[in-house]
Each structure stands twice: as C-alpha cells, then as structure tokens.
Image (cartoon, grey):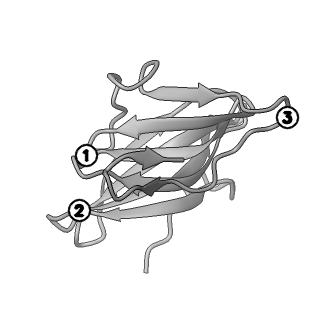
Amino acid sequence: EWSYDVQGNGGDYGRGLVIRDNGDILLTGRSISGWPSYTDCFTVYRINAYGVTQQEFNYDLGANEFVDSSLALPDGKILLVGTSDNDLTVSRHLPSGQLDTTFGSSGKIKIPVLSSTDEGYRATLAADGDRHC
C-alpha cells in the first residue's frame, strides 16, 4: 500500500497511473507546494517496481491547476489533461516524467473553449493512433 502526501496539506490528488514495461510506475495528478503561499502543480511521480519513489516532477503551468486524466502514448510519452488558468490544459511528458518542452508552448497547450472554466476530464487514443481530449 502506498500513500503520497507531498506537503502534508491534504491537497494532493492522484488522477492517473501508467505502468512501464520495466515495471516503473508513473503516478500523475496534482500536488500543492510552497507553504505558506501554496502553488498548484501538474505532478508526475516515478515509482520503481519495489514501491520506492525515484523522481518527482512538479510543473507550475498557471493558476488553479488540476489534472483529471493521463494517457500513455505509443512512443512512451505521457499526456496530462486538466485545467490551469481556467483553460483546458494538456501537457506532454517524456517517459521519465520530465516535461517535453518540444510540445506546444514549453511542454503545454492551453485551449480556451468557452468564457467560463474549461476542463478536460478524459483523454483517449484513437484506433488510428491520433489523440483526442
């Protein structure tokens, strides 16, 4: 059994799990850091097959961030889908969990769909290999 609460403030959420061929696990979600001025972050934890955290990546992509879904891509990269700055936000990460800065604007794209809060809840991979959020 694993329990991860990065800062002890109860604001961390796991929203996705990707299991690698080598047994590594990538736990994706949101964490809050920076007490006393809290910052929401898109987060990826890399955990080895024995349950030991190997790396933690936190990315501040805006304000009011929340990850709702993750998707493992055929090339080993990962998409995180959620919201930041009240816009639908997608970030792409390398197999290690690091942000893939060759994607969009420094690793992320923001899509303002409507004038209110826009949020992506699920990402899927189409049969032709194309990604749909």
In the rendered image, residue 126, in percent from the top left (x then y), is placed at 40, 55
Residue tagged 2: 20
* Amino acid at pointer 1: Pro
- Dividing the picture into quadrants, the one containing residue 25 is bottom left
Mark 1 or 2 closer to N-term?
A: 2
Label 1: few (<14), some or many (≥20) within 10 Å? some
Residue tagged 3: 116
Q: Which mark is residue 95?
A: 1
* Amino acid at pointer 2: Arg
C-alpha distance separating marks 3 and 1: 33 Å
Label 3: few (<14), some or many (≥20) within 10 Å? few
Label 2: few (<14), some or many (≥20) within 10 Å? some
Q: Residue at x 48, y 28 (%)?
A: 108
- Dividing the picture into quadrants, the one containing residue 40 is top right
Mark 3 or 2 closer to N-term?
A: 2
The reply to whether discs 1 and 2 touch (Cβ–Cβ < 8 Å) is yes
Left or right relative to 1: residue 115:
right
**Tag in front: 3 or 1:** 3
Residue 35 appears in the figure: yes
Mark 3 or 1 closer to N-term?
A: 1
Vertical comparison of 38 with 103: above or below? below
